[in-house]
Image (cartoon, rainbow, N blue to C red):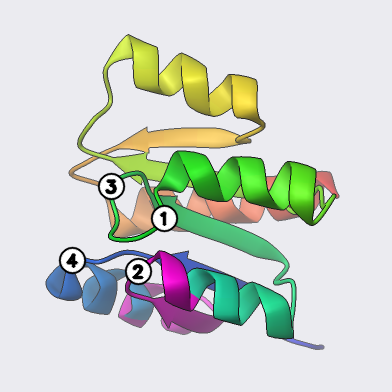
Amino acid sequence: MNKKRLLLAEDDELLASLLNFRLIKGGYDVQISRDGREVKEHLAQQIPDIIVSDIMMPYFSGMELIAYVRKELNSQVPIIIISSAGNEENVLNAFELGANDFIPKPVSPSELLVRVARELNKT
């Protein structure tokens, strides 16, 4: 069985490493982007099976990422937003732009695995 490809866009190195470790253990092929430029580079090469992104990143925010994937790339790849900026306005904005899920930080790696699997099982 092919591993599902997951793009993790997170500029916090410690959190990215923690989530990467857990996602790999969960059976995913993980690519990490530390900022918006890297996100665009990864997406230009290949659209993953699912994207997990922070909102606040250098060069290209998570909100811009959602709009880019939905409008520019015309892709319906599932997008899960993780953010410490989990106020109602940001959550609603993310969903309006086309996010599939929103998890406030601090994020539990085990909860993230469950939500990733749930989104992938919908497709």
In percent of the image, x 70 and y 78: which residue is there?
44
Query: What is the number of the mark on residue 56?
Result: 3
Mark 4 is on which residue type?
A: Asp
Q: Are marks 1 and 2 in contact (CB under 8 Å)?
A: yes
Q: Is residue 86 above or below residue 6?
A: above
Mark 2 or 4: in front is 2
Mark 2 is on which residue type?
A: Asp
What kind of element bears circle 1? loop
The residue indicated by pointer 2 is 35
In the picture provided, is 30 more to the left or to the right than 20? Answer: right
Q: Is residue 115 above or below residue 87?
A: below
- Whether the magenta-drawn stretch holds residue 8 is answered as no
Q: Mark 1 Cα within 10 Å, few/some/many (few <14, many 20+)?
A: some
Mark 1 is on which residue type?
A: Phe
What kind of element bears circle 2? loop
Tell me where residue 33 appears, x and y as whole percent: 41, 76
In percent of the image, x 35 and y 44: which residue is there?
55
In percent of the image, x 32 and y 74: which residue is there?
34
Q: Is residue 121 above or below residue 29?
A: above
Q: Nearer the viewer, residue 13 or 24?
A: 13
Mark 3 is on which residue type?
A: Met
Q: Are marks 2 and 4 in contact (CB under 8 Å)?
A: no
Region in magenta: 21-38
